[in-house]
Image (tube, grey):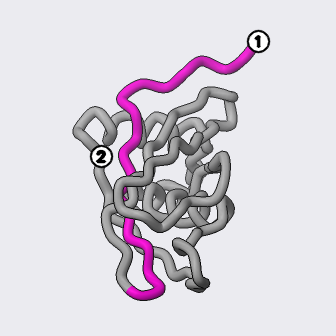
């Protein structure tokens, strides 16, 4: 009988925190429709891209990530997203726009070194 333990969001948080201690910095890119103003990526698209990249880097399932708003496709724009573990602990993730090329907004993500405890 094979007994496999499925990783939880808490283990993803632990894995991300461990990798973050080694200066986790990932480059990401997302496609956006460009209008007359600076392109924007929806908060959901940024969160999904961040979750996919973190999962791929840690070898864990995609974590739950939320972002506070749309990401403006302008070099130097920074946003803080939040990864939440199943135990309620959170880990902040910084998203930094590094370049915009046509309809692609390229950004780096970096997870904080330490997580915050779950709210009481």
Residue at image position (60%, 58%) is: 47
Residue at image position (58%, 36%) is: 10
The residue lying furthest to the right in this view is 120
User: Would you identify the image quadrant in which residue 111 lies?
Assistant: top left
Using a 10 Å C-alpha cutoff, classify the residue at mark 2 as few (fewer than 14 neighbours), some (14 to 19) or many (20 or more). Answer: some
Q: CA distance from mark 2 to mark 1?
A: 29 Å
Up/down of 108 relative to 116, above or below = below
Residue 69: image x %, image y %?
Answer: 66, 52
Residue at image position (55%, 21%) is: 116
Up/down of 39 relative to 83, above or below = below
Image side of residue 114 versus residue 44, left or right: left
Image side of residue 19 versus residue 48, left or right: left
User: Would you identify the image quadrant in which residue 62 lies?
Assistant: bottom right
Q: Earlier in the sequence, mark 2 or mark 1?
A: 2
Up/down of 46 relative to 34, above or below = above
Label placed on residue 120 = 1
Image side of residue 24 versus residue 13, left or right: left
Residue 73: image x %, image y %?
Answer: 48, 67
User: Would you identify the image quadrant in which residue 48 lies?
Assistant: bottom right
What's the magenta region? 102-120
Residue 102: image x %, image y %?
Answer: 41, 87
Report helix, strand or loop for mark 2.
loop
Image quarter where the C terminus lies is top right
Label placed on residue 24 = 2
């Amino acid at each position: 009988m094979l007994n496999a333990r499925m990783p939880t969001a808490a283990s993803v948080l632990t894995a991300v925190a461990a990798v973050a201690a080694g200066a986790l910095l990932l480059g990401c890119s997302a496609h956006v429709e460009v209008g007359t103003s600076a392109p924007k990526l929806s908060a959901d698209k940024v969160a999904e891209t961040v979750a996919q990249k973190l999962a791929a880097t840690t070898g864990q399932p995609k974590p739950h990530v939320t972002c506070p708003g749309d990401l403006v496709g302008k070099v130097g724009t920074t946003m803080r997203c939040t990864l939440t573990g199943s135990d309620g602990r959170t880990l902040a993730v910084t998203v930094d726009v590094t370049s915009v090329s046509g309809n692609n907004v390229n950004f780096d993500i970096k997870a904080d070194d330490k997580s915050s405890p779950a709210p009481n």
